[in-house]
Image: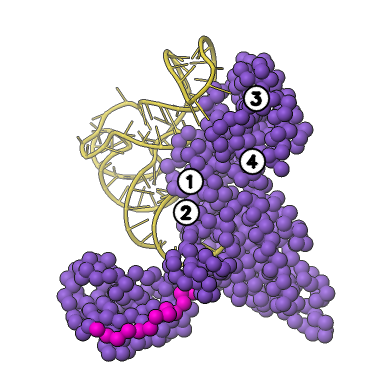
RNA sequence: CGGGGCGUAGCGCAGCCUGGUAGCGCACCACACUGGGGGUGUGGUGGUCGCAGGUUCAAAUCCUGCCGUCCCGACCA
């Protein structure tokens, strides 16, 4: 491809409405343009990258004998009513009506459509297992689209679905899929982790997420430094402390703490370590109108996913209003504590071994110090409530946890019979008996991967593409091509040669000054550059430079393309 | 959904407070010079100032409503 015939839509200025580096660079390099919030056009250069990602995924799916299909993006409401999700899914499901007022939605995912297909097509266990996949645009009317294509409303997803006669068979496909995912992300040149995950609203028993490591990631993941334990922080267990409760040393005292409402204010005011404080968070209970107090160490964070799984707590988790708390507990948010609190309490594991701690006195502007379980308050029900932290012991007993930010780019689930039971997805087993199929589903955020790759690979000049997904592998930068006949001839000759070698090559033949060409090509992030200038050309030489390096290297014009061919494969 | 910011040329912004000819930089077009890191000069193209209403002799500017968009918190590939 020649730049003179291509759309190089680079911008010098960082767009005002972009926050993270990948979004800024995708717009500046001319990969995407926004049409509306969370809805983007992919320009030629961006689409090349997207297609490269898709093709790697496609190859690995085909390698494990998954079969590609395409399902409709517009889906009738009736299959959603059958699964129960027409009511459950909420406003993220974009609903529309056709001219006959029949209801449809834009597909946010395809469990309903695939289950409908499979229940009609498959009749026998002999046809199983079967895995189908598609790569397609999805639409989710996100509450808050952000960060460009990282969290868009319309986005490209690879979704695969497997069907089985038994859960053992599902487990096998699930494991195969997990390996295929690792291969895909390795081939994409990304630093990633596979982690245990909460299965969330899709339901089912077992799931893993694949995260690309990046500081801008919206998730936190925890992994052991000594074993292969890795989990989303939502899921990672904070194990019971090994130390035991020590004897009280202080007597309980009430202290006035005027205008102290947060833990950090309390710590400043009393000049005590934060690990000696506890906080009491009031949430709604599962019995209507009831409240539950959650007790955590002052420096710990509540894990809401863990909390809402506890029977006594309402799910989804909902924080109590301050009015109600005041009415029932006699004090506002900043002054609560477990001593004499007239509601159900649940303490985090780490709280259960604290002694001589500090907590709210359930009296406005007052706290208690030297509080001890048993003597001053009964130790309530103990649960794992908190978020794990850097340095916590690994739940498998091996090593300690590191906590890093991650971008979720893949998620695999064992769904079980959730959909096949709701939608009557049955086959005959070997005994001739009707039985529900067992199902797995497996997603990859294709367009999100493009953004994630940039988050992980960029510098002050722009994008640095991993070689497997770069829009072009090689750019030939011809300097002063308009005026110099020898440069033009050499550039054309190398360009043709590169094409013969099957290299994805871009020839920058624009009549622009060198600085503009260098800056554009570095912003776009093409891995390899050949620079053709009149001076070195007179000695039969051209220059080579990798995107990742500052230094140029001289190559004879004859060896240039073969040398680069070797770098690419 | 709650809280906050912003909407003026393709992009980045000033003007608004204190109403009176719509501006700057980049980009774009033409010509000339220049030609190894976003060059220089001259001349140009491009705007319903988000939309609607109101106040006023007069509104980008003041008032009201709406819309869009971005950021911060509960959801997800």
Residue at 83% x, 74% y is: A126
Give the Cα distance between marks 3 and 2: 39 Å
Tell me the residue that label 3 is attached to: A542
Element marked by disc 2: loop
Residue at 47% x, 53% y is: A216
A461, above or below A167, in the image: above
Tell me the residue that label 2 is attached to: A216
Residue at 61% x, 17% y is: A535
Tell me the residue that label 1 is attached to: A21
Please state if A367 lies on the left or on the right of A192 as rendered: left
**In the rendering, which numbered label is found on residue A471?**
4
Give the Cα distance between marks 4 and 2: 24 Å
Taking depth in this image into account, of A505 and A467 the one nearest to the observer is A467
Please name the color used to draw chain A: purple
Residue A338: image x %, image y %?
30, 83
Sequence order check, earlier mark of 4 and 2: 2
- The quadrant where residue A507 appears: top right
Please report, as a chain letter, where disc 3 is located: A
Residue at 82% x, 76% y is: A124
| Count of marks, rendered view | 4
Same-chain status of marks 3 and 4: yes
Split into 4 quadrants, where in the image is the C terminus of chain A? top right
Which chain does the yellow colour mark? B
Sequence order check, earlier mark of 4 and 1: 1
Same-chain status of marks 2 and 1: yes
Q: Write down the region rendered in magenta.
A: A234-249
Mark 1 surroundings within 10 Å by alpha-carbon count, few (fewer than 14), some (14 through 19), many (20 or more) = some
């Amino acid at each position: 491809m020649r730049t003179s015939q291509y759309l190089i839509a680079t911008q010098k200025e960082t767009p005002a409405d972009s926050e993270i580096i990948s979004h800024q660079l995708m717009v500046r390099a001319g990969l995407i343009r926004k049409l509306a919030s969370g809805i983007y056009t992919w320009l030629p250069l961006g689409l090349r990258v997207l297609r490269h990602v898709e093709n790697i995924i496609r190859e690995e799916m085909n390698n494990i004998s998954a079969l590609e299909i395409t399902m409709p993006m517009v889906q009738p409401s009736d299959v959603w009513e059958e699964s129960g999700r027409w009511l459950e899914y909420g406003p993220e499901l974009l609903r529309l009506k056709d001219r006959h007022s029949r209801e449809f939605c834009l597909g946010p995912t395809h469990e309903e459509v695939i289950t409908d297909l499979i229940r009609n097509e498959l009749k026998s266990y002999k046809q199983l297992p079967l895995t189908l996949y598609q790569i397609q645009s999805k639409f989710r009317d996100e509450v808050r689209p952000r960060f460009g294509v990282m969290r868009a409303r319309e986005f490209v997803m690879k979704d695969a679905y497997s069907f089985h006669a038994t859960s053992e068979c599902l487990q096998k496909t699930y494991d195969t899929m997990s390996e295929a995912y690792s291969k895909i992300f390795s081939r994409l040149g990304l630093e990633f982790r596979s982690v245990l995950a909460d299965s969330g609203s899709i339901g089912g028993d077992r799931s893993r997420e694949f995260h690309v490591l990046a500081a801008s990631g919206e998730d936190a993941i925890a992994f052991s430094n000594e074993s292969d334990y890795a989990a989303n922080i939502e899921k990672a267990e904070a194990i019971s402390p090994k130390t035991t409760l020590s004897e009280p040393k202080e007597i309980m005292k009430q202290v006035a703490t005027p205008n102290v409402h947060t833990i950090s204010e309390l710590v400043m005011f009393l000049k005590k370590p934060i690990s000696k404080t506890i906080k009491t968070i009031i949430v709604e209970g599962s019995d209507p109108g009831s409240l539950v107090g959650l007790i955590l160490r002052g420096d710990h964070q509540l894990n809401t996913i863990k909390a809402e799984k506890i029977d006594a707590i309402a799910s989804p988790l909902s924080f109590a209003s301050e009015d109600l708390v005041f009415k029932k507990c006699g004090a506002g948010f900043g002054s609560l504590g477990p001593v004499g609190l007239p509601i159900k309490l649940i303490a985090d594991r780490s709280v259960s071994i604290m002694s001589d701690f500090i907590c709210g006195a359930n009296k406005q502007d007052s706290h208690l110090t030297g509080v001890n379980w048993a003597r001053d308050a009964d130790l309530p029900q103990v649960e794992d409530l908190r978020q794990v932290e850097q340095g916590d012991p690994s739940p498998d007993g091996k090593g300690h946890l590191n906590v890093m930010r991650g971008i979720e780019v893949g998620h695999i689930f064992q769904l079980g019979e959730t959909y096949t039971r709701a939608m009557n997805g049955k086959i005959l087993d070997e005994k001739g008996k009707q039985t529900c199929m067992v199902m797995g589903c497996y997603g990859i955020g294709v367009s999100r991967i493009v953004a994630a790759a940039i988050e992980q690979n960029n510098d002050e000049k722009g994008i640095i593409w991993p070689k497997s997904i770069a829009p072009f592998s090689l750019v030939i930068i011809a300097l002063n091509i308009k005026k110099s006949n020898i440069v033009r001839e050499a550039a054309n000759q190398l360009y043709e040669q590169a094409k013969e070698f099957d290299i994805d090559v871009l020839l920058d033949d624009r009549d622009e000054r060198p600085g503009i060409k260098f800056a554009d090509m570095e912003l776009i992030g093409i891995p390899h550059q050949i620079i053709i200038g009149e001076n070195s050309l007179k000695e039969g030489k051209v220059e080579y430079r990798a995107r990742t390096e500052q230094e140029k290297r001289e190559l004879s014009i004859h060896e240039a393309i073969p040398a680069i061919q070797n770098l690419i494969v």
